[in-house]
Image: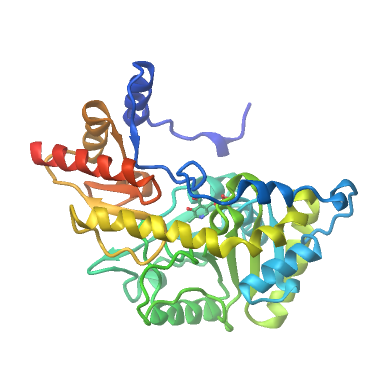
Amino acid sequence: MFSSRLDWEARPNRLAEALEKRRLAGLPVLDLTESNPGRAGIEFGAGEILEALDDARSISYEPDARGLLEAREAVARYQGASPDDIVLTASTSEAYSMLFKLLCDPGGEILAPRPSYPLFDYLARLESVEVRHYSLLFHEGWWVEPGEWERRVTPRTRAIVVVNPNNPTGSYLRRGEVERLSRLCADRGIAIVSDEVFADYRLDPSPEIAPTLAGVEDALTFRLGGLSKSCGLPQMKLGWIVVGGPAATRAAAMRRLELIADTYLSVSAPVQHAAARWLARRTPFQERLLSRVRGNLEVLRGFTTPPRVEGGWYAIMRLPATRSEEDWVVDLVDRHGVSIQPGYFYDFQTEPFAIVSLLPKPEIFVEGIRRIGNALDES
Ligand SMILES: Cc1ncc(COP(=O)(O)O)c(C=O)c1O
């Protein structure tokens, strides 16, 4: 009766069960997976955020499929692009869905990094698109081996996704990697989708890092971002696609994206009218968030040597190979009251790894890391 796109294997999740058991027993958990800045107590000025929504223009409905000009102009100033090359979406996830519709027929393929953000498989499947993976290898930093993208591309590949910086490895592409990627994509007529939702949260000033794919001229490029990470406002539901690359292809893509956006008109007027004011306040918020991240990273470094974190909100910990990732994270909840994510959530190819968010309040983070230290000492 139902579409096979929804036939997802429901893997029993022992971590969710362990957390639920603890909750029912009324026992607290130190949550080192928290990734909502608001819940982590990072001040974003609730009063002013809400005030911006109180705008009389929001009472009339005058949609523009690409997004209202004033909001696109605000995103354009922020992204150093033209408002004519921008389409607003309700989220980055929706932006992916629109791009998969734009680029792929059913059965088309996209290449996505591994390890990375776990939603691609679901987003692609809902568009009847297949995900093939390319590997990020770890050797004193994360990198894409020369020839890796070329090996993974097939005649059905329509786009290569990069997440810059990547979640959860916190790694940016190198300038040389961007050159290789754009040359390959230009030669083969493949689009680049660059997820830059964490791009403002750079921690490493090394010049070899490519902080954004803005400026790629030879290949059709879609850069994605949103308020969810730029302003810590996931609940407001505003994202964007910035289109770059050769003028004629860019214009053809924009016409088609406009048609897709016009079919849904999913971004609300109040949010679009408020967007310029919210974006104007992003810098102090981002500074507070970065200061939290740096502080927690220091705490983590006092206890272990996490792989270099170049940007973003997460850090990876290598756990002793005395038991599986799942056993580690379940035991940490059961016996130590600390919640962290196992590497397999992000498709790490070896284990055991764990991912910690660098957003939690310092008192929670310090105590959580101390308890993890005790658990490791016991093992
Ligand atoms: C790499 C990456 N891209 C996209 C998103 C989703 O962002 P949005 O809330 O705009 O859909 C996330 C959320 O965590 C993410 O980590």
Quarter location, residue 341: top left
Compared with 342, 224 (above or below) is below
Give the camera-side residue of 9 and 308. 308
Is the N terminus in the top left, top right, bottom left or bottom right quadrant?
Answer: top right
Compared with 127, 323 (above or below) is above
Quarter location, residue 24: top left
Residue 108 in sight in this render:
yes
Residue 30 placement (x, y as % from top left): 33, 35
Residue 319 placement (x, y as % from top left): 18, 47
Residue at horizontal 61%, vertical 75%? 220
Residue at horizontal 58%, vertical 47%? 234
| Left or right: 81 as drawn, with respect to 116 | right
Residue at horizontal 72%, vertical 80%? 248
Quarter location, residue 166: bottom left
Residue 203 placement (x, y as % from top left): 38, 68
Residue at horizontal 23%, vertical 69%? 140
Compared with 257, 180 (above or below) is below
User: In this figure, what is the number of numbered marks?
Assistant: 0
Which residue ends up furthest to the left in the rendered image?
378
Residue 29 placement (x, y as % from top left): 33, 30
Coloration mode:
rainbow
Give the camera-side residue of 220 and 304. 304
Give the camera-side residue of 153 and 203. 203
Residue 157 in sight in this render:
no
| Left or right: 21 as drawn, with respect to 253 | left
Is the C terminus in the top left, top right, bottom left or bottom right quadrant?
Answer: top left
| Left or right: 184 as drawn, with respect to 27 | right
Give the camera-side residue of 186 and 296. 296
